[in-house]
Image (spheres, rainbow, N blue to C red):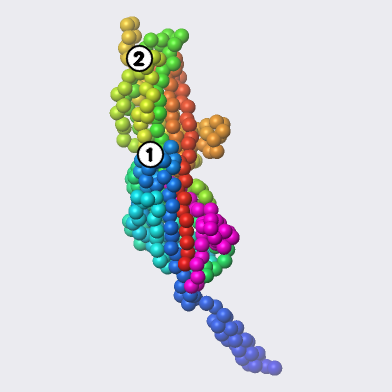
Amino acid sequence: MNIKNILIVGVAILLGTACSKDKGSVSIDDLPNAKLTIGVKASGAVTKAGDPNALEGEMYINNLAAVVFDETGTVLLGKAQENVNTQDGTAYLIDVPAKATKARIILLANLPGGVLDNVTTYDGFQSMLAELSAQSQADLTMSSQVIVTNNALVADDNNYLGYESMGSENINGISSPLEVTRLAARVEVVAFHTNFAGSKLEGRTVRVEDVYIQNQKTASRYFSAGYWGPVVVNGHFSNSSKVTINRILNDASPILETSYRHYVMENDADEEATQLVVRATLLEAPGYTAQIKTFYATVNANGLANKYDHNFVKRNYIYRMNITFGPNSFEILDGVLDVKVEVVGWGPVNQDVEIE
């Protein structure tokens, strides 16, 4: 066999392989259609009855969105976002387009308008940022874990996810309702005390002037792959506006009601820790002049040591700060506050998902 014949045989083999591959490959566009109908059940969505830690509005679901990618995340199979009615605690998102293939499914609540317009891939969506400025008590953005289906969605048949009545017939056998968790956290000051008894400050009075948050994160990712997973991003720091307190306290008259609340985004303190800043005045007394001082308290710096599951600020948690001015608080060089932080998780919002 000469070289010419070898070349002809080689080209024929390559052509045959290419033809065979073309016949065996299937484009996403050629796959049968599937569609998602999402039913949402929000525990305590309208009132805080389902969660004693939630303020009025923090459980609201005002709109519901679903984004469906192929299993690689490189192809967008479908997306939808609709305003929903949470007056009875349930809502539905109907006819979200998808394809009969393995998929990644992400569910989001209270997504600002226009966010989905530029979503085309999983990685692209993962790089988009939710803004602190878009978070409010009655409109907190929430998201589910990413569900990667073990099998292809079935065309022209019901595919269920999170339906207890369907048992093992659910996608990936997940029969418990999915949960969406908030992207924001809440920091609040629940009490101010003085502890001056038996010290040179006994009988003295303090006025809390104002409070603000330093090094708050102003952005996060919209979702995480895992349940209640991290959404923190680098950078995006600011200080909040000062809130005037102007309240007086002493050992006999502490401030025992919540005097300050503020939402922040997740911050693991890899760069800068989120801090509560308190400006207070030790008022003048016979023989003493007034002293004013600014105090800085890192939010949840010792969470793990206090037997919580994390340090610093994690999404969907409430940080209740109980602050005490002690005998040494107003020392010029070494004065500090005694700060106790209670870490409380917001109750979950449950979702039942049906895919048709």
Give the percent coordinates (x, y) of residue 239.
35, 37
Q: In this orientation, which residue lies closer to the viewer: 352 or 20?
A: 352
Q: As rendered, which of 261 and 18 lies closer to the eye?
A: 261
Let me know if residue 263 appears in the view.
Answer: no
Q: Where's residue 279, x and y in %? A: 35, 25
Q: Residue at x 44, y 32 (%)?
A: 320
**Residue 77 spot, x, y in % from top left:** 45, 67
* Circle 1 residue: 55
Query: Which residue is found at the position 47% from the left and 61% from the top?
Result: 354
Instruction: Kindly state the secondary structure of the residue where label 2 is placed.
Output: loop
Q: Residues within 10 Å of mark 2 (few under 14, many from 20)?
A: many
Circle 1 sits in a helix, a strand or a loop, which is it?
loop
Residue 205: numbered disc: 2
Say whether marks 1 and 2 touch (CB < 8 Å). Answer: no
Asked if residue 59 shows in the view, the reply is yes
Tell which tag, 1 or 2, sits nearer the viewer. 1
- Looking at the rendered structure, the kind of residue marked 2 is Thr
Does residue 142 sit above or below 260 in this rendering? below
Between discs 1 and 2, the one toward the N terminus: 1
Total marks drawn? 2
Question: Among all residues in the image, which is located at the extreme top?
Answer: 287
Estimate the spatial distance between the alpha carbons at disc 1 and disc 2, rounded to whole Å: 32 Å
| Residue 175 is a magenta residue | yes
State the residue at coordinates (54%, 68%).
Answer: 152
The answer to if 42 sits in the magenta stretch is: no
**Residue range highlighted in magenta:** 155-182
Q: From the top left corner, tell me how far across and down residue 155 is, in percent.
A: 50, 72
